[in-house]
Amino acid sequence: MIIEILKEYYPMLFKGVGYTLLVALVGTVIGLLIGILIGTYRTMPKPKNKFLRAMKRVGDFLLAAYIEVFRGTPMMVQAMVIFWGFALLNGGATLDVTVSGLIIVSINTGAYMAEIVRGGVISIDSGQFEGAHAIGMGHGKTMFYIVIPQALRNILPSIANEFIINIKDTSVLNVIGFTELFFQARTIVSINYQTFATYLLVAIIYFVLTFGISMLLRFVERKMDGKKNFKVLGSQNMDADSFVREEGGIG
């Protein structure tokens, strides 16, 4: 029965998979950029000027409120508020559902990424900051050229996890009519009335997507780690004969 549903409705299912992956990937990337910007701002040293210091505190408060609100409320509710809130402010004209889906997932992911990036930045040794400042680099350059690249490597598993979560969470966007995989499943059920078989097939598709992407990201992570076992080839003080002997060239 599942095979029959797949054969008959595969165009709709593939379309749903495409939209699901699109909004999950784009939302994760934009969310990461939001997280990097927020992480950079929140780790800025306090300005000496009183006015700038006050503005920094206001900015920190607003960003903290954004993070807590979007982490503390369900994405489904956020989708309804943003989609219909836009319509309320524009005389009933709604935003394109694809654009709405990208905005909703990106903003929601940004709130989580902000804390992930902050944790990654904190994990970097303070000597990295001190060394950069010692050679005259400002906070922005220090973050983007030295700290963030190292932090991204540390938080890569968390970023991958957010991507996988987004693949599953895009299902809530069906409440605004976004034609992702779950929306297509509901449409198919309304046609064939085979509720169990259809949703079981969709569950299998979700599992294949998340498991496959998880394996791919782990492979990338292992490649970035490089070889676990390696040999340090001598030192600056080692003479040529000693180096050759270490390599096994001389018995």
Image (tube, helix red, strand yellow):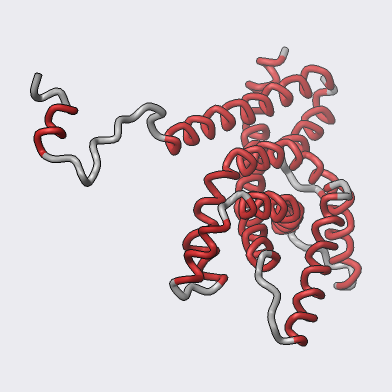
223 relative to 109 in the view: left or right: left
**Which part of the image, by quadrant, shows the C terminus?**
top left
Q: Where is 68 relative to 206, above or below?
A: below
Q: Find residue 142 and report its horizontal and vertical position in percent.
A: 52, 66
Q: Find residue 63 and report its horizontal and vertical position in percent.
A: 78, 65
Q: Find residue 111 and report its horizontal and vertical position in percent.
A: 75, 55
Q: Where is 228 relative to 154, above or below?
A: above
**Which residue is found at the position 69% from the left and 83% from the top?**
48
175 relative to 151 in the view: left or right: right
**Which residue is found at the position 46% from the left and 32% from the top?**
222
Q: Nearer the viewer, residue 181 or 155?
A: 155
**Which residue is found at the position 87% from the left and 46% from the top?**
74
Q: Where is 196 relative to 22, above or below?
A: above
Count of numbered marks: 0
**Which residue is found at the position 13% from the left and 27% from the top?**
245
Q: Find residue 180 and report its horizontal and vertical position in percent.
A: 72, 41
- Picture quadrant of residue 199: top right
